[in-house]
Amino acid sequence: GLSSEGLIYMGSEFDRNETVKRLRDMPILNFRSSFAYSNIHYNALGLIIEKVSGLSWEKFIQIKVLDALDMHSSTSDTEDPKTFNTVTPHRFLDYENGQIKPVTSVFPQSNAPAGGIRSTSSDISKYIKLLLNNGIINSDTIIQPKTIKEFWEPHNRSGEYWTREGSFSAY
């Protein structure tokens, strides 16, 4: 596997293509020899979606997921002010004293496939219903049931335990 992506990911000025291209320079670890959390691979998946569909990742998600589920208060464009009814993320300044402050930085659009969807609790509940209904909403199959089944299967080990065994969840 790859080590953690470090500075080629969050906070960099690299676009999605450049970020993925720089993966070739990352050190390679022995398969399953250690765990290194990484979101950069979602950028690669975003580029695959773009190549196969002929749409940008943002447009594909908007049409195939958000519009299909009537998630009209959600967007995959981190600069789109469509979602007015969202929370502001916060982070701890001093964990022991409970001091927190709002996070003002915007999630980089170049890294949107790794978690750049802005939504509301009402819209997210529509997505949860899709998952709980095996990919089917209003008699329309949005995601194949066999794909949904695979979502729920463990794909990674955390320490000595498979994730389903109660350790860190890594799906």
Image: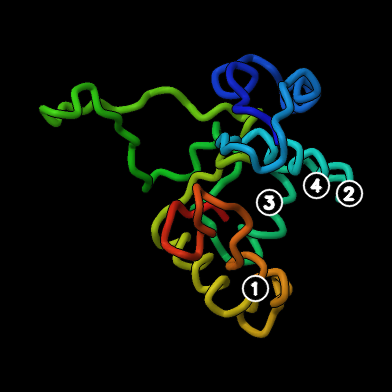
Position of the N terminus, as image quadrant, is: top right
Q: Could you tell me how far apart the alpha carbons at marks 1 and 2 are, in whole angstroms?
A: 23 Å
Q: Could you tell me how far apart the alpha carbons at marks 3 and 1 are, in whole angstroms?
A: 21 Å
Amino acid type of the residue tagged 2 in the rendering: Val
What number is the disc on residue 61? 3
Q: Position of residue 143 (x, y in %)?
A: 70, 70
What number is the disc on residue 52? 2
Q: Could you tell me how far apart the alpha carbons at marks 3 and 4 are, in whole angstroms?
A: 9 Å
Helix or strand or loop: what does disc 4 sit on?
helix
Q: Which residue is mark 4?
A: 49
Amino acid type of the residue tagged 1 in the rendering: Lys
Q: In which quadrant of the rendered view does residue 4 lie?
A: top right
Closer to the camera: disc 3 or disc 1? 1
Mark 1 or mark 2, which has the lower sequence index?
Answer: 2
Q: Decide: marks 3, 4 in contact (CB < 8 A)?
A: no
Q: Name above or below for residue 76 compared with residue 105.
A: below
Q: Decide: marks 3, 1 in contact (CB < 8 A)?
A: no
Position of the C terminus, as image quadrant, is: bottom right
Identified at 69% across, 77% down, the residue is 145
Tell me if mark 3 has few (under 14), some (14-19) or many (20+) residues whose alpha carbon lies within 10 angstroms of its own: many
Q: Could you tell me how far apart the alpha carbons at marks 1 and 4 are, in whole angstroms?
A: 21 Å
Q: Name above or below for residue 147 compared with residue 55.
A: below
Identified at 50% across, 57% down, the residue is 161
Q: Decide: marks 2, 4 in contact (CB < 8 A)?
A: yes
Amino acid type of the residue tagged 3 in the rendering: Ile
Mark 3 or mark 1, which has the lower sequence index?
Answer: 3
Helix or strand or loop: what does disc 2 sit on?
helix
Q: Position of residue 70 (x, y in %)?
A: 57, 65
Lateral position of residue 107 relative to residue 105, left or right = right
Q: Residue furthest left?
A: 97
Identified at 89% across, 49% down, the residue is 52
